[in-house]
Image: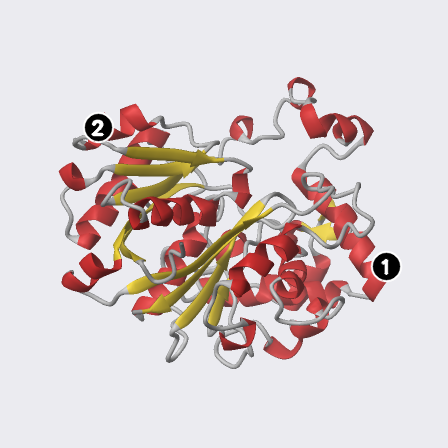
Amino acid sequence: MSIKDRTAIVGIGQTTFAKTLPHSELWMACTAIKGALDDAGIDPAEVDGLSSYAMEPNIEVEVARNLGLGDVSWFSQVGYGGGAGCAVVGNAAMAVATGQCRVAVAWRARKRGDAANRPWAQVGERVEGPAQWSRPWGLLRPVDEIAMLARRYMYEYGMTREQLANAALAFRKHANQNPAALMYDKPLTREQYLSARWISEPLCLFDNCLESDGAVALVIVAAQRARDLDGPVVLIHGFSQGLNAQHQTMTNYFRDDPLEGPAWACSQLLWRHADFGAEDVDVAQLYDAFSPLIPLSLEGYGFCKRGEGGDYMEDGGIEWPGGRLPVNTSGGGMSEAYVHGINLISEGARQIRGTSTCQVEGAETSLVTSGEGVPTSALLLRKG
């Protein structure tokens, strides 16, 4: 049973993005959800499905009570942090398509401006599970783990820092058009990138996502109901999750090829069930906690061959206007805000609606991906 084109995103809501917000995560979650419901023209009492991240601090009971929801018939959470975003929406779509609920909301609220809230804070208390094989030997933060993969990629395929800079520069360019982005009024030059301080060599300051506070929510209903509401229809055309054999979270050390991450497993199912391929995607929102994830994702989802991700980003290849594949048109996690990637989904939906601040002309298909480097997920959106 396929969920292809049977559901749609009809509401988008978000809080302000900031380095630090004074509000609680519960306030942010409820504000974003209410905004999404208002955008859809749906009363909170109609919501009967709730979908969130396993890392989400707000439990369903508190969200439902504070928003004044009615009876809830389905609720679910998805693990693996940044890998969860598209699955949170995809699982909600499956629930709606199979009748488990009629109106589902998916959301993420997080406070990361305070260093104590970051998952690598208080490292001595967090050495368990997969972390026991990396943190005691100096890979204390996710950036240290991705830096190892980046160095391997550079060694294997000759990618340079100049090529890697193209991701940071493209996303900053797009964010400079987005008033909601943290980097809206902060242009970035190639010279600034190349002279920036190291965070974990070969990754510099601008290869990293932002640490920010904020929340985003989306409303998912059946496609037929979406057509009865005001506004353009954003169909959920495809959804998949991926965890490849012998994967190790973030480092991928146990695989013969550590550069072949979960995107490769995720993309197989995604394209198998789709009516179009990578060559037909008009715009993409690729998870960008760190810049090396962009060439890895471009290859994993079939936009170029192995080792060609760095070349693909050359000459404005992922910029709009002019790029062969505009990527992260709101600024993404590196220049809009880092909300575990759910803001990439809202931007993917805005592109289909035609309301992005960096609108790709004639966009009818959009790919959104979640974290490469962890068990991941992806969505294909299209105009209804």
Q: Is residue 223 left or right of residue 58?
A: left
Instruction: Give the Cα separation between the discs numbered 2 and 1.
Output: 52 Å
Pick whichever, 272 or 350, lies toward us.
Answer: 272
Residue at the image position 66 percent from the left and 39 percent from the top: 142
Pick whichever, 16 or 314, lies toward us.
Answer: 314
In the depicted structure, whether residue 41 falls above or below residue 191 = above
| Whether residue 56 is visible | yes
Q: Is residue 264 left or right of residue 36?
A: right
Mark 1 neighbour density, 10 Å: few (under 14) some (14–19) many (20 or more)? few
The x and y percentages for residue 280 are 50, 76
Residue at the image position 16 percent from the left and 32 percent from the top: 70
Quarter of the image with the N terminus in it: bottom left
Q: Secondary structure at mark 1?
A: helix
Q: Secondary structure at mark 2?
A: helix
The x and y percentages for residue 78 are 47, 37
Residue at the image position 68 percent from the left and 42 percent from the top: 250
Pick whichever, 140 or 48, lies toward us.
Answer: 48
Residue matched to label 1: 155
Residue 132 shows which numbered tag?
none
Quarter of the image with the C terminus in it: bottom left
Quadrant hosting residue 192: bottom right
Mark 2 neighbour density, 10 Å: few (under 14) some (14–19) many (20 or more)? few
Please name the amino acid that badge 1 sits on. Tyr
Please name the amino acid that badge 2 sits on. Asn
Q: Residue furthest top?
A: 125
| Whether residue 356 is visible | no
The x and y percentages for residue 320 are 49, 75
In the depicted structure, whether residue 197 falls above or below residue 101 = below
Residue at the image position 71 percent from the left and 71 percent from the top: 305
Residue 66 shows which numbered tag?
2
The x and y percentages for residue 76 are 39, 34
